[in-house]
Image (cartoon, grey):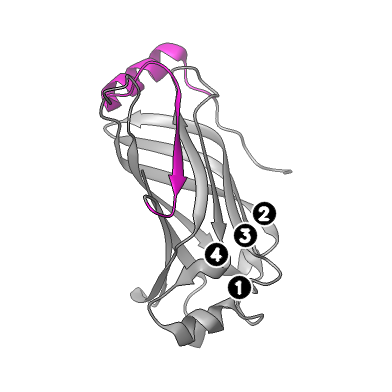
Amino acid sequence: MAGMRRARAPRPAAYLAALAALGCAASARAHHLDGGNTQVSFQVGQLGLHLFSAAFRELQGEFTLSPQPGVAHLTVVVAMASLSSRSPAWDERLRSTDWLDTAHFPRMSFRSFAVQLEGGGRARIEGELTLHGITRSLTLVLTDVDCPAATAGGSDCRFLGRGHLKRSDFGLPHGFFQGGDEVTIVVRGR
């Protein structure tokens, strides 16, 4: 996409040190994400108050940390109709053509193009989010990245990621009675 900056890959020594600080194995291992172990949710507020949140029950993806720069990545594909806000009436309204139009836009996806490990259990992931048929850049800030050693010599990584988007950037309704334009996306991965 025009105008998008690609983050520079860290130097190998710094990257290896960041992986070691997270307790990650020296070899790349893909961690498959699914709705049973991973949650993608969103929160919408207005005037600084939390108004609404919902999560998606069905998703697939992969998360890889590697000592080789350019190999680490995160991909997530969410089934939009799996939205759950604990209110069936709201769920149907959000799935309708007035909001997310899940019949015409059945998936939301995120694909990283750069992962920067920052140490202290933190990482920054630059990528592209496709939602409602529109693709925009999105940065996820990962905290609580934890990769304890597994008995098989790999690792079992967990993370908490947050990103922010504007509904108007994706052609989604917003306004005073519909909640604010800014949405917080939360990804809890394992």
| Label 3, label 4: how far apart the Cα atoms are | 18 Å
Spot occupied by residue 18 in the image (x, y as percentages of width and height): 34, 23
What residue type is disc 1 on? Leu
Q: Is residue 60 left or right of residue 130?
A: left
Q: Are marks 4 and 1 in contact (CB under 8 Å)?
A: no
N-terminal of the pair, mark 4 or mark 1, is: 1
Relative image position of residue 178 (x, y in whole percent): 50, 83
Which residue is identified by label 2? 135
Residue 153 percent coordinates (x, y): 32, 19
Which mark identifies residue 100?
Answer: 1
Of the two numbered discs 4 and 2 in the rendering, the one whose residue sits closer to the viewer: 2
What separation in Å lies between label 4 and label 2 (alpha carbons)? 12 Å
Q: In the picture, residue 1 is in which quadrant? A: top right
Report the Cα–Cα distance between label 4 and label 1: 14 Å
Amino acid on which disc 3 is placed: Arg
Tag on residue 107? 3
The residue to which callout 4 is attached is 166
Q: Which residues are magenta?
A: 9-36
Is 160 rendered above or below residue 156?
below
